[in-house]
């Protein structure tokens, strides 16, 4: 048993009258000890449920991110061919436990951005408690891109070549993957699930996009980002806590840029002639077919959401000057074959390593 960890556990688990929040340094140390297995399983489980009941603070989340930055993998800065200077890398923070009601749009968003020359990093693992929804890794595998076979150096090469990288925690960050079974055992999302939405597995300055459900979570994001000196981030009250813009309600978005005040943006689908229906998730196989139908030009709810999200992100990432031109450019990238071409480029880059293994 770790006596040092027991002090952190005692501090957050003493109840509403005598319990205390951790400092940033204490939260970092506690996270480090859990990742490295210095705390016992009993201590880790107790910490997760106590922290869940207490609710994390922005300062604690900053400390947790400090530990992930110290121990976790990092993709290195790249230069995009033909782009001078290279656009800022976008990191899409999406719930690790996946989706089970609405169809994920973010793989399409990543393809649209990279086709437009904006590098993107995604991250996640396998099916995960508590939702056990479809994870990103399965969607990419359905699209012919198996990130799970690459080590971090190979992922770096794909990132350099195509502009898209995927940090797969089961292979690239086994210490974090080792904490996943506790989610099943405690039956609740621990604060790590919130922190993961903010994590940037990138060695340079990134534009971090974090999805959320509840407004207090966004406040914690802002406090933690401020403490860590992260100046460029976007928060999205998205579908199932993701950064996918909804169409059945006004999209509530927070924009933070260097040397600028935090800005609140409300986007209504009605103002841009989109319907109010989000594409539903039924199965991974059906989802993959729907995604592929988008660049085949088949009208669908998936097509509508791809254009809606692509339009916003091309604008938000500085590719287009406004939402209307972002929508027009998204349609162009989808219909002229650039998105399909980008996917094939990524497939080929990933498959090249698998061919080496087979040889």
Image (spheres, rainbow, N blue to C red):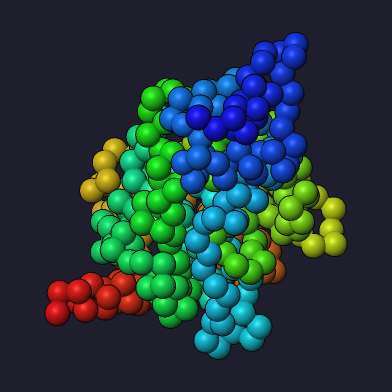
User: In the depicted view, which residue is nearer to us: 98 or 300?
Assistant: 98
Name which residue lies at 43% across and 62% down: 166
- Whether residue 267 sits left or right of residue 2 in the image: it is right
Residue 183 picture quarter: top left
Compared to residue 90, the image places residue 213 above or below, namely: above
Please identify the residue farthest to the left as the structure is shown.
359
User: In the depicted view, which residue is nearer to us: 310 or 129?
Assistant: 129
Residue 22 picture quarter: top right
Name which residue lies at 78% across and 49% down: 226
User: In the depicted view, which residue is nearer to us: 324 or 39?
Assistant: 39
Name which residue lies at 43% across and 80% down: 161
Give residue 334's position: percent from left, percent from top.
Answer: 42, 68
User: In the depicted view, which residue is nearer to us: 185 or 143?
Assistant: 185
Compared to residue 337, the image places residue 148 above or below, namely: above
Res. 247 in view:
no
- Whether residue 311 sits left or right of residue 284 in the image: it is right
- Whether residue 89 sits left or right of residue 171 in the image: it is right
Give residue 39's position: percent from left, percent from top.
Answer: 51, 35
- Whether residue 17 sits left or right of residue 285 in the image: it is right
Give residue 212's position: percent from left, percent from top.
Answer: 59, 39
Res. 200 in view:
yes
């Amino acid at each position: 048993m770790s006596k040092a960890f027991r002090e952190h556990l005692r501090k957050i688990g003493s109840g509403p009258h005598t319990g205390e929040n951790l400092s940033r340094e204490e939260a970092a140390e506690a996270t480090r000890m859990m990742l490295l297995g210095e705390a016992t399983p009993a201590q880790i489980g107790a910490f997760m449920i106590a922290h869940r009941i207490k609710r994390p603070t922005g300062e604690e989340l900053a400390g947790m991110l400090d530990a992930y930055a110290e121990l976790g993998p990092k993709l290195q800065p790249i230069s995009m061919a033909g782009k001078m200077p290279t656009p800022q890398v976008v990191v899409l923070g999406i719930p690790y436990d996946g989706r089970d009601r609405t169809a994920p749009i973010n793989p399409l968003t990543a393809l649209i951005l990279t086709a437009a020359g904006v590098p993107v990093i995604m991250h996640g693992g396998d099916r995960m408690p508590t939702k056990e929804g479809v994870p990103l890794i399965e969607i990419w595998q359905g699209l012919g891109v198996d990130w799970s076979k690459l080590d971090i150096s190979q992922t770096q090469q794909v990132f350099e070549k195509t502009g898209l990288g995927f940090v797969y925690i089961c292979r690239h960050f086994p210490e974090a993957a080792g904490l996943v079974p506790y989610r099943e055992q405690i039956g609740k999302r621990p604060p790590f699930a919130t922190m993961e939405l903010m994590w940037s597995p990138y060695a340079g300055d990134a534009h971090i996009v974090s999805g959320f459900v509840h407004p207090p979570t966004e406040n914690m994001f802002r406090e933690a980002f401020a403490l860590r000196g992260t100046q460029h981030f976007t928060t999205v009250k998205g579908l199932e806590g993701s950064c996918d813009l909804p169409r059945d309600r006004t999209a509530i978005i927070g924009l933070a840029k260097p040397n600028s005040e935090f800005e609140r943006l409300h986007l209504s689908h009605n103002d841009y002639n989109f319907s109010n229906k989000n594409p539903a998730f039924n199965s991974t196989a059906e989802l993959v077919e729907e995604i592929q139908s988008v660049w085949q030009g088949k009208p669908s709810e998936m097509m509508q959401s791809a254009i809606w999200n692509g339009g916003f992100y091309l604008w938000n990432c500085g590719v287009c000057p406004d939402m209307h031109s972002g929508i027009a450019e998204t349609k162009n990238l989808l219909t002229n074959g650039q998105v399909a071409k980008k996917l094939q480029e990524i497939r080929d880059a990933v498959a090249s390593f698998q061919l080496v293994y087979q040889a």
